[in-house]
Image (cartoon, helix red, strand yellow):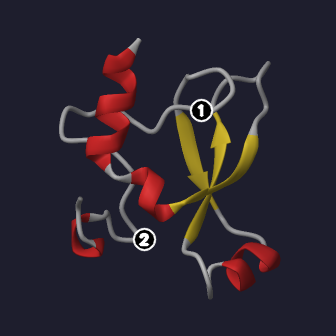
Amino acid sequence: MPSRYDLPSPNEPDVAANGARMPCPRCRLEMDRVERHFLDRVISLAVPVRRYRCVAPRCGWEGTLRVSELTPAAAHADRTKS
């Protein structure tokens, strides 16, 4: 289990060592990290979250994901499952 020190800093993109970006939960394409809303910041006081938006125009998914779900190792393992 990675420690919180293994996570990317808030100013770095969430990119795995192989260059893969975080997959969208809906369409599995890449996502961009976007600025959090006020409520996201409040939630982050209890559970660290980051806000993402899918790059696919037809998908349009935007939402928050827990930081613990965003480790580069988890993203790489998720992409290799399929």
**In the displayed structure image, the side of residue 49 where residue 71 appears, left or right:** left
Q: In the rendering, at what x and y percent does residue 52 appear?
A: 63, 50
Check the picture and name the quadrant holding the N terminus. Answer: bottom left
Q: Quadrant of residue 40?
A: bottom right
Q: Pointer 1 and pointer 2: residues touching (CB < 8 Å)? A: no
Q: Quadrant of residue 39?
A: bottom right
**In the displayed structure image, the side of residue 38 where residue 18 appears, left or right:** left
Regarding mark 1 in the picture, which secondary structure is present there? Answer: loop
**Residue of label 2:** 10
Regarding mark 2 in the picture, which secondary structure is present there? Answer: loop
Residue at 62 percent across and 84 percent down: it is 46
Q: Residue furthest left?
A: 17
Q: In the rendering, at what x and y percent does residue 11 appear?
A: 40, 69
Q: Which amino acid type corresponds to the residue marked 1 in the rendered image?
A: Cys
**In the displayed structure image, the side of residue 39 where residue 3 appears, left or right:** left
Q: Tag on residue 24?
A: 1
Above or below: residue 45 compared with residue 79: below
Q: Which of label 1 and label 2 is nearer to you?
A: 1
Q: Quadrant of residue 29?
A: top right
**First in sequence: mark 1 or mark 2?**
2
Q: Which amino acid type corresponds to the residue marked 2 in the rendered image?
A: Pro
Categorize mark 2 by other alpha carbons within 10 Å: few (<14), some (14-19), many (20+).
Answer: few
Above or below: residue 82 compared with residue 23: above
